Amino acid sequence: MSGLYARESRSVSTMAHLRFFPQAVVGGSGAHLTADDGRKLLDFAASWGAASLGHSHPALREAVNRALSDQAGASYLSTANEPCVLLAEKLLSLVPERARGRVWFGHSGSDANETVARMVVAATGRPRILAFNGAYHGGTVGSMAVSGHPAQQGARAKDLTLVPYPDGDGDLAHLEKLFATEVPPEEVAAFFIEPIQSDGGMLVPPDGFFEALERLCRRHGILLVSDEVKVGLGRTGRFNAFEHLGIEPDIVVFGKGLGGGLPISAVVGPEAILNHAVAFSLQTVHGNPVCAAAALAVLQTIERDRLVANAERTGRVLREALDRLALRHSLIGEVRGRGLALGVELVADGKPAARQAALTVYRAFQLGLVLYYVGVNSNVLEFTPPLTLTEAEAQEGVVILDQALADVAAGRVDEALLADFAGW
Ligand code: PMP
């Protein structure tokens, strides 16, 4: 264990820790991090997708420096500032017509989804919310309340109904039955969806399911909320991840990669909902011009450097390399995802291989690759690298993963290493 990691344990609380191996970093550039022992690590996690442009991107540095050198205050609560207005205008141009109303800014996916959950109920007068089993919409009380991930310790809202994420044909029979029995649809304000259920295990919905769901929601006046926090903003090879589903949500939620690593989130939706009340959901440095300037630079860089196309192209290279690995490693049950939002599900004897997933990411870290795992059964390796990832870096990472999987399968990785790394 490195010196920095050990020192951290003597000063920093573990309450926000989600640790898979003793990673301690002192710098980074592009898709690489520098560990405090000088090792270079190839980063296929990008801090859970937040470092959308990689580390130390010149466009982000320049935007943040500029915003700080002539700082237009530190908040949008009581004053307009230019970066926020420009960012709101830009975001409105990136969503479907029906969501093109107003933009709310927050710090995180969590505060954004919490705000949506409160706002849709207040604005429609309907008390109920729908979401999927396994959904992760945030880690605050109000966002956990509308989530369905088993790792969370917060309580669900009493008016939340969780439905199974579709697999197979993904028909709507379950939902239609609910509507006919215990969940009157006219009481439902909104349905929260993830276009790929990422923390639930990088689950890609079956074709046509969400189109049918959208029709059902429209019939009952239920707002469709697309949580694009993890897989939006180009990561799937389309700008908005919901574009793959053939739907047009009423409300779009952005976070993580929006700030390229700085804390900012955004909710975009109809004016009647987003302007329902004033002083309804606010924190002091919401809408600060520094994070807004960073987000603008992220969006401009995604456009200028054609990073959506890069996610599609490099994602295909990564996917094909992972598919080839699957032919040689019996631990790999399935490779799935879109663009640079990919998952590799590990199974052993037909069961979720959680222990092997933990050992694999640990071994990959020892060999120089940063990769975490997700899934309601903790057995899906998650790939959310920077959108700037090159094809050579994609191949380099898969070579390391190949070795890590081989070492795990051969029993060459000591299980005792996992003692302090429970993951989730
Ligand atoms: N929505 C989704 C789909 C997420 O994956 C996450 C985080 N994993 C969140 C919301 C919450 O975002 P944050 O942790 O930045 O608050």
Image (cartoon, rainbow, N blue to C red):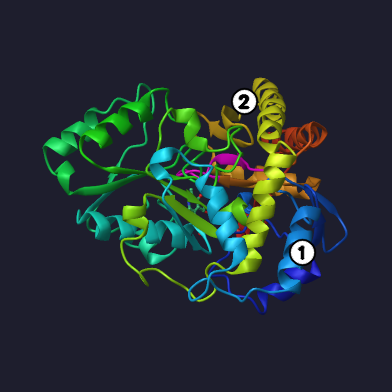
51 vs 73: above or below: above
Residue furthest to the left in view is 181
Q: Is residue 227 depicted above or below 326 in this figure?
A: below
What separation in Å lies between label 1 and label 2 (alpha carbons)? 31 Å
Pick the quarter of the image with the N terminus: bottom right
Q: Secondary structure at mark 1?
A: loop
Residue picked out by circle 2: 330
**In the rendered image, is residue 297 in sight?**
yes
Instruction: Decide whether residue 97 is among the magenta residues.
Output: no
Residue at point 52% right, 61% down?
Answer: 108
Q: Amino acid at mark 1?
A: Met
Start-end of magenta stretch: 374-386
Examine the rendered structure and indicate whether residue 23 appears above or below residue 189. below
Q: Residues within 10 Å of mark 1 (few under 14, many from 20)?
A: few
Q: Position of residue 371 (x, y in %)?
A: 67, 46
Badge 2 amino acid: Ser
Q: Identify the residue position indicated by label 1 in the image.
A: 1
Foreground of the two, 8 or 166: 166
